[in-house]
Image (tube, grey):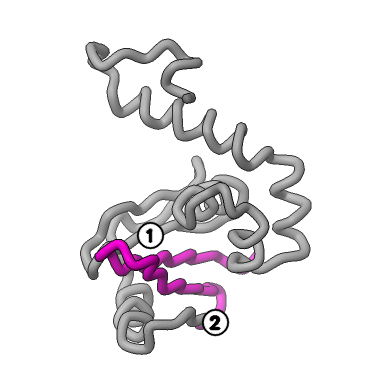
Amino acid sequence: MAHIILGHSELTTKRVRNERDADQMAAELMLPEVEFRQRMARMDFVQLRQSYQHASWEVVGRRWAQLRPAVLTIFDNGLLRTRLAPPGLVHPPRPTEPELSILRETIEAREHLLVTDPPLTIASYFIDEGKRVERVIILTEVDE
Protein backbone atom coordinates (compact mmCIF):
# COMPACT_ATOMS: atom_id res chain seq x y z
CA MET A 1 0.00 0.00 0.00
CA ALA A 2 2.81 2.41 0.84
CA HIS A 3 4.41 1.85 -2.58
CA ILE A 4 1.14 2.81 -4.28
CA ILE A 5 0.65 5.90 -2.10
CA LEU A 6 4.24 6.99 -2.80
CA GLY A 7 3.82 6.43 -6.55
CA HIS A 8 6.55 3.79 -6.84
CA SER A 9 6.61 1.58 -9.90
CA GLU A 10 8.57 -1.57 -10.72
CA LEU A 11 10.44 0.37 -13.40
CA THR A 12 12.08 2.78 -11.00
CA THR A 13 15.84 2.56 -10.52
CA LYS A 14 15.79 3.78 -6.90
CA ARG A 15 14.66 0.47 -5.40
CA VAL A 16 16.63 0.64 -2.14
CA ARG A 17 15.48 4.17 -1.37
CA ASN A 18 11.91 3.31 -2.39
CA GLU A 19 11.91 0.29 -0.08
CA ARG A 20 13.20 2.40 2.78
CA ASP A 21 10.57 5.09 2.15
CA ALA A 22 7.78 2.51 1.84
CA ASP A 23 8.91 0.74 5.03
CA GLN A 24 8.88 4.06 6.88
CA MET A 25 5.39 4.95 5.63
CA ALA A 26 4.07 1.48 6.47
CA ALA A 27 5.50 1.79 9.98
CA GLU A 28 3.77 5.15 10.43
CA LEU A 29 0.46 3.75 9.18
CA MET A 30 0.58 0.48 11.15
CA LEU A 31 2.43 1.66 14.26
CA PRO A 32 1.86 5.40 14.77
CA GLU A 33 4.85 6.91 16.55
CA VAL A 34 3.08 8.64 19.45
CA GLU A 35 1.02 5.57 20.32
CA PHE A 36 3.97 3.22 19.81
CA ARG A 37 6.22 5.30 22.10
CA GLN A 38 3.55 5.28 24.82
CA ARG A 39 3.28 1.51 24.63
CA MET A 40 7.07 1.09 24.54
CA ALA A 41 7.28 2.95 27.85
CA ARG A 42 5.14 0.35 29.61
CA MET A 43 5.59 -2.90 27.64
CA ASP A 44 8.43 -5.22 26.77
CA PHE A 45 9.00 -6.27 23.16
CA VAL A 46 6.79 -9.39 23.32
CA GLN A 47 3.90 -7.50 24.88
CA LEU A 48 4.31 -4.76 22.31
CA ARG A 49 4.16 -7.28 19.44
CA GLN A 50 1.07 -8.88 20.98
CA SER A 51 -0.62 -5.48 21.16
CA TYR A 52 -0.01 -5.00 17.41
CA GLN A 53 -1.16 -8.36 16.08
CA HIS A 54 -1.69 -6.86 12.61
CA ALA A 55 2.08 -6.25 12.37
CA SER A 56 4.82 -8.84 12.00
CA TRP A 57 7.57 -9.35 14.54
CA GLU A 58 9.96 -7.78 12.02
CA VAL A 59 7.84 -4.65 11.55
CA VAL A 60 7.58 -4.17 15.33
CA GLY A 61 11.35 -4.75 15.63
CA ARG A 62 12.10 -2.23 12.91
CA ARG A 63 9.89 0.35 14.58
CA TRP A 64 11.53 -0.36 17.96
CA ALA A 65 14.96 0.21 16.42
CA GLN A 66 13.81 3.46 14.79
CA LEU A 67 12.69 4.93 18.08
CA ARG A 68 15.33 3.69 20.53
CA PRO A 69 19.11 3.49 20.52
CA ALA A 70 18.97 -0.14 19.40
CA VAL A 71 20.52 -2.31 16.72
CA LEU A 72 18.05 -4.72 15.14
CA THR A 73 19.53 -7.95 13.82
CA ILE A 74 17.40 -10.66 12.20
CA PHE A 75 18.52 -14.19 11.45
CA ASP A 76 16.41 -16.60 9.41
CA ASN A 77 17.38 -20.26 9.84
CA GLY A 78 20.68 -19.11 11.33
CA LEU A 79 21.60 -16.80 8.43
CA LEU A 80 21.95 -13.04 8.81
CA ARG A 81 19.08 -11.34 6.99
CA THR A 82 18.88 -7.79 8.37
CA ARG A 83 20.98 -5.49 10.52
CA LEU A 84 20.00 -1.89 11.05
CA ALA A 85 19.94 0.94 13.55
CA PRO A 86 18.52 4.45 13.77
CA PRO A 87 20.46 7.24 12.07
CA GLY A 88 23.40 8.39 14.13
CA LEU A 89 23.81 5.20 16.14
CA VAL A 90 27.30 3.92 15.41
CA HIS A 91 27.39 0.14 15.37
CA PRO A 92 29.47 -2.65 13.85
CA PRO A 93 28.15 -3.72 10.43
CA ARG A 94 28.33 -7.40 11.44
CA PRO A 95 26.98 -9.00 14.63
CA THR A 96 29.39 -8.96 17.56
CA GLU A 97 30.51 -12.04 19.46
CA PRO A 98 28.04 -11.41 22.33
CA GLU A 99 25.21 -11.18 19.77
CA LEU A 100 26.33 -14.37 18.02
CA SER A 101 26.59 -16.11 21.39
CA ILE A 102 23.00 -15.21 22.33
CA LEU A 103 21.91 -16.27 18.84
CA ARG A 104 23.35 -19.75 19.42
CA GLU A 105 21.78 -19.98 22.88
CA THR A 106 18.40 -18.80 21.57
CA ILE A 107 18.38 -21.35 18.75
CA GLU A 108 19.40 -24.13 21.14
CA ALA A 109 16.85 -23.17 23.83
CA ARG A 110 14.15 -22.19 21.28
CA GLU A 111 13.03 -19.40 23.59
CA HIS A 112 13.50 -15.69 24.25
CA LEU A 113 16.63 -14.69 26.16
CA LEU A 114 17.95 -11.54 27.76
CA VAL A 115 21.59 -10.78 28.54
CA THR A 116 22.70 -7.65 30.36
CA ASP A 117 26.40 -6.87 30.10
CA PRO A 118 26.73 -3.13 30.79
CA PRO A 119 26.64 -0.98 28.85
CA LEU A 120 24.81 -3.44 26.54
CA THR A 121 21.48 -5.14 26.89
CA ILE A 122 20.89 -7.86 24.31
CA ALA A 123 17.41 -9.31 23.96
CA SER A 124 16.89 -12.27 21.66
CA TYR A 125 13.51 -13.55 20.48
CA PHE A 126 12.94 -16.99 18.98
CA ILE A 127 10.06 -17.02 16.50
CA ASP A 128 8.73 -20.12 14.77
CA GLU A 129 5.37 -19.50 13.15
CA GLY A 130 5.36 -22.84 11.36
CA LYS A 131 6.43 -21.41 7.99
CA ARG A 132 9.68 -23.39 7.71
CA VAL A 133 11.59 -20.35 8.92
CA GLU A 134 13.00 -20.15 12.40
CA ARG A 135 13.63 -16.49 12.99
CA VAL A 136 15.69 -14.91 15.73
CA ILE A 137 15.31 -11.19 16.31
CA ILE A 138 18.03 -9.58 18.37
CA LEU A 139 17.68 -6.10 19.82
CA THR A 140 20.97 -4.74 21.14
CA GLU A 141 20.68 -1.57 23.18
CA VAL A 142 23.24 0.68 24.77
CA ASP A 143 22.24 1.65 28.29
CA GLU A 144 21.79 5.37 28.56
Q: Identify whether 28 is placed above or below 63.
A: above
Q: Position of residue 42 (x, y in %)?
A: 77, 64
Could you give the CA–CA distance between mark 1 and mark 2, rounded to whole angstroms?
A: 17 Å
Residue plotted at (48% across, 52% down):
56
**For the C terminus, which image quadrant?**
bottom right
Please give the residue where the numbered disc 1 appears in the rendered image.
73
- For the stretch drawn in magenta, the main secondary structure is strand
Magenta stretch in the rendered image: 115-144
Image-based side of 12 in relation to 7, left or right: left
Residue sitting at x 54%, y 74%? 121
- Name which residue type carries label 1: Thr
Q: Is residue 34 left or right of residue 6?
A: right
Task: First in sequence, mark 1 or 2: give its number.
Answer: 1
Q: Nearer the viewer, mark 1 or mark 2?
A: 1
Estimate the x, y position of residue 3 in percent, counting from the top left: 42, 21
Name the disc covering residue 118, or none.
none
Q: Residue at x 45, y 27 (%)?
A: 22
Q: Secondary structure at mark 1?
A: strand
